[in-house]
Amino acid sequence: MNDLFSKIEQIEQSLQQEFEAINDFIFRHPELGGEEYISVKYLTDVLSQYGFEITMPYCDLDTAFRAEFGDREETKIAFLAEYDALKGMGEKGEPAHGCGHNWIAASSVGAAIVLSQLKDEFKGQIVVLGTPAEETFGAKVDMVERGAFDDIDIVIQGHLGNENILNTQAMAMNSLEFRFTGKPAHAAAYPYNGVNALDAVQLTFAGVNALRQHIRPEARIHGIVSNGGAAANIIPDQAACKLTMRASSSSYLEEITQKVKNCAKGAALMTGTTMEYGKFENSFLDMVNIPSLQEIMKEGLTKAGIENLLEEEVEPKGSTDIGNVSYQCPTSYVQLDVEGDEPFLAHEQSAVSLSNSSYAMKKLHQAIQAFAYTGLYLFLNEKKIEEIKEEHQKILAKKGGKSCENKE
Ligand SMILES: [Zn+2]
Ligand SMILES: [Zn+2]
C-alpha cells in the first residue's frame, strides 16, 4: 500500500493549487445554512470539470447535491462536503466561516478528485454529497431520512480543531419547544379570571433547574423563553420556551428528554394550562466510531505526516448532524489540529482567522491524502468493507439502536 500512497501523494501535489483555491473561494463567499447557492454552484462546477455527474438540488434541498464518478453498480464511498458559514461572525456582523466548513468542502472534494484520477486501479463509485446547513437545521438528518445514504457503503469527512482526534465524539441532542395556552385577563382588575401561560414556562424552568442535580455531569440542558406573553397588564394566555437537551449517548438523551417533558407536563398541571410540544430543530444522534475503519484512516493520516493522534475517546463538546449519518453508514469522522499561531476554537474569532490560513492549507493537503488513501484502500479491499459493516451492526446492537425525537 506504500506504492499506492505515493501515487496519491503525487496526484495530490500536482493539484494543490486547485484545492487551495476551493478552500479560499468558499471562505470568501460565506453563506448561511440553506442559502449556500454560490458555494454549491462553485463546487459542482469544479466537480463536473473533473468528470463528476451532478444531481442538484438533491433530497428536496436547494443547496444539497450529489456528485458521482465511476461504476454505478459497485462499492460506493461518499465524501461529505459542508459549506455553511456562521451568522454575524464577520468584521461588520456579516456571516463568516468560523467553523472551517470551507475547509471541509475543500478536503472532501479534493479527496474525491484525487481518487477519480486513480479510477483505472479499482472498481467502484466515488460520491461527493453536498450537505448544507450543518450549523442550523442539520440537513444531513433530512438526507438520511430521504435515503441519500441508503446505497452508500462508507462515509468519510473531517473537521478542523485544536487537537488531532481519531475517534471524534458528538453529543446526541434533542431540541424541543413547549407551548402553553392559558386564558387572558386584565392583570389588575380580574387576574383571578386568567390562566397564566408564562407561569407554566417559569415552572418548567424551575423543574428543569431542580433536575440538573440529578443528571450526569456531561449532559446539558439549556434554553430560552421564546414567547413570554404580549403585555405586562394582561395575564399571558400564550407562552413558550425552547429547550435543548444533550447527552453522550442517545439512550441517556432519551431518559433526560422524558424527564424534561415531565417538567413541562407538571407545569401545565400546576397552572391549569394546556401544553403541546414539538422539535424546533432536527435531533442529532451521537457518533458511532468503528475501530476497523478508523485503523485504516489512522494509517492514512500517519502516512500523510499527522502526528500526535489521540485515539482514546475524548469528551464530546458539541453535537452534529453527521452523528445521524454514522448510525446509517459506517462513517470515519476525524478532527485535525490546525497547529496555527493560536488554538483553533470553533465559533470563535480564532477559527475565522485560521480557516483560510497557510496552517489550514497544510492540513488540507494532509487530509486529502489521508482521505483518498482510506478510500483507495477500501475500494481495493471489498472484504474489509464487509467486516466494517458487520462491526458497525454489532456496535449499533450494543447501543440499543437509535432513538431520538426525529423518530417519534
Ligand atoms: Zn460549527
Ligand atoms: Zn463545524
Image (cartoon, rainbow, N blue to C red):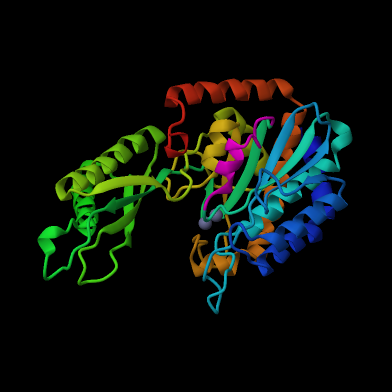
Position of 306 with respect to 310 (left or right) is right
Position of 294 with respect to 315 (left or right) is right
Residue occupying the point 81% across, 51% down: 47
In magenta segment, residue 352 = no
The quadrant where residue 276 appears = top left
Q: Position of residue 404 (x, y in %)?
A: 43, 36
Nearer to me, 400 or 216 = 400
In magenta segment, residue 147 = yes
Range of residues picked out in magenta: 137-151
Which quadrant: the C terminus? top left
Which quadrant: the N terminus? top right
Position of 408 with respect to 101 (left or right) is left
Can residue 167 be spotted in the picture? no
329 up-or-down from 169: above or below: above
Can residue 31 be spotted in the picture? yes
Residue occupying the point 79% across, 34% down: 125
Q: Position of residue 335 (x, y in %)?
A: 56, 48
Q: Position of residue 22 (x, y in %)?
A: 74, 60
Residue lying at the far bottom of the rendered structure: 92
